[in-house]
Image (tube, rainbow, N blue to C red):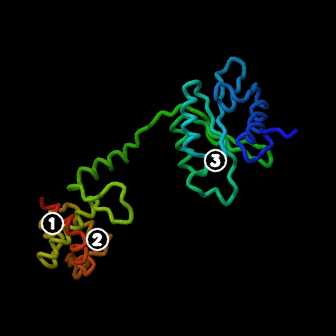
C-alpha cells in the first residue's frame, strides 16, 4: 500500500524527512496534533511545532503566527526550490523571507525531497527589534525638509519629488529668473544652503559651470521647470 507521505505532490511528502530529522535529535514526533502538521517533544522541553507547505506563502506565515500561541518553537517547512525557482519573490532562501521569519520569531526549514534532507535556515528565536538610528534620522530629516506632498503613495514609474529635488528646483528657478550666477549669489537667491553641493554633483544634469564658480541652467534644467511646474508652485505656498 502506498503511504500518503510518498506523494511528492502533497504537503505530506515533507512529513517523513522532517520527522526523521527531529528523531535523530532525540525528539518524539507525532503528526496532526490539535491542528498542527507536526509536533515534537524532547523530555520536558517545550514542544516544537512544524507547519508544512509545498511553497512559502502568506497562509503558511499566518499558520505559524497562530501556532506561536502554543509554543515559541515554531518552524515553517517548505521544499528546497529547484534551481530555476530560487530567484522568485517568495523563494525561502531570499534574505527578505529569512528576515521576515526572524522578525516574527519563526524558524524556517528547507526540505530536500529527493534525498530526504532537512536544512534549518532560521531558528525560532523571539525577535527583539532594534531601531536603526541612522535610517530613522534620515527619515525624519527628509520629512522635515520636504515642502508639501507632491508624491502619491504607491505610485510607480514617476520621479519622486524629494527634498533634494525640491532644492535643485529652487536653484533651477533662480537661474532661470536671474541668469548665470556665482554659487554664493545663487545660494542666497534660491534660499538653499546646500546649493554648492547640488551644483557640483549635478545629479539631474540641470546645471552647467560656464566659468569658475559661475553656473547656468542647461536645456534639461529648463525642461525640468515645466515638467515639475506643480512641485515648484507648491514651494511658493
Please report contact status of discs 2 and 1: CB closer than 8 Å, yes or no: no
Crowd class of label 2 (few under 14; some 14 to 19; many from 20; radius 10 Å): some
Q: Nearer the viewer, mark 3 or mark 2?
A: 3
Q: Position of residue 97 (x, y in %)?
A: 56, 47
Question: Which residue lies under the disc numbered 1?
Answer: 190
Of circles 3 and 1, which is in front? 3
Q: Does residue 96 appear left or right of residue 223 in this picture?
A: right
| 157 to the left or right of 127 | left
The image quadrant of residue 189 is bottom left
Q: Is residue 197 above or below residue 180?
A: above
Give how far across and how far down residue 84 sits, in percent.
67, 60
Q: Which residue is mark 3?
A: 55
> To which residue does mark 2 refer?
200
Which numbered disc, 3 or 1, marks the residue that appears first in the sequence?
3
- Point out residue 19 in the picture as x, y percentages from the top left corner: 76, 33
Residue 9 in the image: x percent, y percent? 73, 47
Amino acid at each position: 500500500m502506498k503511504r500518503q507521505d510518498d506523494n511528492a505532490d502533497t504537503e505530506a511528502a515533507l512529513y517523513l524527512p522532517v520527522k526523521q530529522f527531529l528523531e535523530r535529535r532525540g525528539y518524539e514526533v507525532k503528526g496532526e496534533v490539535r491542528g498542527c502538521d507536526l509536533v515534537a517533544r524532547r523530555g520536558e522541553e517545550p514542544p516544537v511545532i512544524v507547519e508544512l507547505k509545498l511553497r512559502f506563502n502568506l497562509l503558511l506565515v499566518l499558520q505559524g503566527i497562530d501556532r506561536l500561541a502554543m509554543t515559541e518553537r515554531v518552524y515553517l517547512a517548505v521544499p528546497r526550490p529547484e534551481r530555476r525557482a530560487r530567484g522568485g519573490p517568495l523563494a525561502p532562501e531570499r534574505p527578505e523571507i529569512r528576515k521576515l521569519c526572524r522578525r516574527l520569531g519563526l524558524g524556517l526549514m528547507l526540505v530536500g525531497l529527493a534525498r530526504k534532507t532537512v536544512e534549518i535556515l532560521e531558528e525560532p528565536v523571539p525577535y527583539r527589534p532594534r531601531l536603526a538610528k541612522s535610517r530613522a534620522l534620515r527619515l525624519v530629516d527628509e520629512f522635515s525638509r520636504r515642502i508639501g506632498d507632491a508624491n502619491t503613495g504607491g505610485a510607480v514609474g514617476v520621479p519622486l519629488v524629494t527634498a533634494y529635488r525640491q532644492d535643485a528646483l529652487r536653484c533651477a528657478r533662480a537661474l532661470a529668473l536671474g541668469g548665470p550666477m556665482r554659487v554664493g549669489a545663487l545660494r542666497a537667491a534660491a534660499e538653499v544652503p546646500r546649493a554648492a553641493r547640488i551644483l557640483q554633483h549635478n545629479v539631474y544634469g540641470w546645471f552647467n559651470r560656464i566659468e569658475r564658480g559661475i553656473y547656468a541652467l542647461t536645456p534639461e534644467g529648463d525642461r525640468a521647470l515645466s515638467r515639475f511646474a506643480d512641485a515648484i508652485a507648491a514651494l511658493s505656498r
